[in-house]
Amino acid sequence: MSTLLAAPTKKPRTTMSKARKPTTSPPSRKTKTRRSKATAQTLAGQQREISVSEFFAKNRHLLGFDNPRKALLTTIKEAVDNAMDACEEGGILPDIFVQVLQLGETRFKVTVRDNGPGIVKQQIEHIFGKLLYGSKFHRLKMSRGQQGIGISAAGMYGLMTTGKPVLIISKPSKKKPAHEMRIKMDTSKNRAEVVSDEVHQEDDKLFPQGTGTQVEIELEGKYLKGRQSIDEYLEQTAIANPHAHITYVTPGNETRTFPRSVDELPDEPKEIKPHPKGIELGTLIQMLERTEAAKVGAFLQNDFCRVGPSKAKEICQTAGMTNMTWVKNVGHREAEALYKAIQEVKLTAPPTDCLVPIGSKALLAGLLKGVKAEFYTASTRPPAVYRGNPFQIEVGLAFGGELPAQETARVIRFANRVPLLYQQAECCSFKAVLDASWKNYELSQPKGSLPLGPLVVMIHMASVWVPFTSESKEAIADYDEIRKEMKLALQECGRKLGTYLRRRKRMQRESERRSIFERYIREVAKSCEKITGADAKKLYEALLRQAERRTAQADQQLDDEGRILNETARLAKDEQVVIVPAQQPDPANNGNEIGESLFENPPKPQRRKTTKRSRKKPRSPRRTAKRK
C-alpha cells in the first residue's frame, strides 16, 4: 500500500524545454492631445514687423558685443572712430580724451570727448538712439564709419546691461552754451526716447576750443591689459593717426598720453559716383527707376563716374539703343542688354581722390613712435579696384631693436585707419602675410606659419567701402584683388629688409676681421722694429690704413634719418627706409696706443691643448748615413 500511496515522481526537465516568458502588463494607452490646425487667417494675424534694433539686441554678438571684455573695447572703439571722423571733417586736429572709470567689479563708465564741430540738438537723439542712421552709408568716400550702427549699438548695450541712459554733452557753437541730453533706445520701434534735455553753461569748460562732443556710457564689462585690449587699440590708433593727440585715463587712474607726431591733417577725400563695372543688374534697374535724367545717355553720364559722351554713345550702340532713348521706355530686356554692354566696353578705373592713405612718411613716423626697432620701411601701392570700388594698400615693417627675437612676427591690421584686433586668422591681411615667402628676405618661416624673428608687420587698407566679414568690422574679406595688392606691397618691403639684413651681416663680418687685424698689428709692428729697426709707429699706422681700406664696409655712417651716407648704396636714397643706429660699445679701452701690449689685459682661461707623442722610434744616424 505504501507503494501505491507514494507521491508520483516528477519527470526531469529536458534541455529542449522552452523557457517561460515573463508576464508583462499590457501597455497603458496615452491620451493624444488634439493638435490645433492653423489657418491662413490665424497665421496672418501672427505676422508683425521686426525692428532692426530688436534684432541686433538679440544678436548683439554680430556687432562685437560677444563678451564683457570685447564689449568694453567695442564701445570705446566706436566712440573714438566717430570723434576722429568728426574732427577731420571739421578741419580740426583731433584732440581725443578717453576715460574708463570702474564703478564696480564688472561695471564701468566710459567717457570719450573730442574737440570736433559738435552735434546740433535735433540730430543727437537720432545719432545715438537709432540703428542704421548716419551720413556715410550712401556716399562713396573714405571714412572710418560705414553703417550707422556702432555708437547707437554701444548705447543700446549699456542700456540692456545697466538700465542707464546715454549722456551726451554737445557744444556746436562758441557763442552758445553746451546742452546736455540723456536718451535711451526703444528697441521695439528703433527710435530714441529723450529722458532729459537741459542747457548747462558750466559744461563749457570741457571744451576749451569752443566746440566739441562728450559721450558717457555706463555698461557691464571687463578690463584686462595685453593683446586685444583698450591699451593696444589706442596704441595702434596713435600709429595709424599720427596727427591725433590722445589722452587716456585707465581704470587704475593712470594717465597715458599719445602725442601727435604730425601737425598736418590728411587731405580731405572727395565723394565719387559709382563705377559702372561695380554694379549688378538689379542695382542698374533700380537706378533707372530713380534717376532724374530723361535720356539713357544723360543717365550714364550723370549717375556714373568715368563715363563721358563718347563712352555713353558706345555703350548705347552696343546695347542696341541710342543716347536719345527715353529712360521710361527701358524695360527689363533693354536693361539687361545695357548691363551686358557695360561689361563689354572698356572703361577707365574709378578716380582715387576719394582715398586718403596714411602715406609712407606718416606711416614711418607712427612706427617710430610706437615700435622700438632698428630698421623701418614702408610701401604704398598704387590704387586698385575690386567690384568697382577703389582701394589702396599700405605696408610698414619694423625689425630688430627691442622686439622679441624668439617669437613669431606680429601683424598689425588696419582698415581706413582703424585697428582690427579680432578674427586675425579670417582676415585677408593675415593670409597675405602667410603667403609672402619670407625666406627670400633672410628670415626663417615654418610652413604655413608667420616668420620668426623680431618683426612687426603693419598692413593698412584704404577704401570707399571696406568689405568686412561681419557687422562688427573685425576682418577684411578675402578678395583676390585685395590679397594680390597686399602681397606685392609685402614683397616690396621684404626686399628692402633683405637688403638691410645682408648688408648688416657683411658689416659684422668686416668688423670682426678688422678687430682681428687691430689685435695683431701692434705686435707685428713691434717685431718688425726689433728685426729691421723700422719705426714701429709709422709701420703700425700704415698697416692700420690697410686694414681700414680692406674692411671699409664696417665704417659706413648714417645720417640724422638713419640712411647710409653712401651714394652708391641701394638704401641710401630711399625715403621709405629709416635705420636707427645700434648703440656701440665704449671704444675708450680698445688699446689704440702703440705702447700697449696685446696681452696686457689678463686673458681668459683656456684649456691646455695636449698633443699625443708619436710612438715611432727615431731613426739612428747610422741608417740615415747609409741611405745617403
Image (cartoon, rainbow, N blue to C red):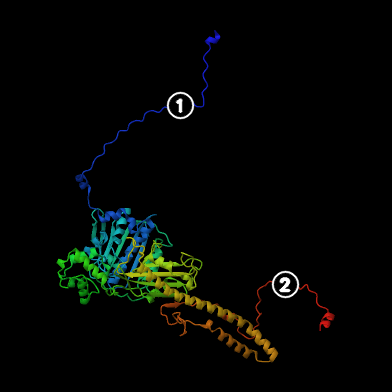
Q: Residue at x 19, y 45 (%)?
A: 41
Q: Front-most of 368 and 607?
A: 607
Q: Earlier in the sequence, mark 2 or mark 1?
A: 1
Residue 323 falls in which quadrant of the image? bottom left
Type of the residue with mark 2: Thr
Q: Front-most of 248 and 432?
A: 432
Q: Which residue is drawn at 32% across and 54% down?
A: 59
Q: Is residue 260 left or right of residue 623?
A: left
**Eye-nearest disc, 2 or 1:** 1
262, above or below 104, in the image:
below
Q: Which mark is residue 487?
A: none
Q: Residue furthest top?
A: 1
Q: Which mark is residue 610?
A: 2
Q: In this view, does 410 lie to the left or right of 111?
A: right
Q: Position of residue 392 (x, y in %)?
A: 34, 72
Type of the residue with mark 1: Arg
616, above or below 58, in the image:
below
Residue 255 visible at all: no
Q: Which residue is drawn at 80% across and 74% down?
A: 617
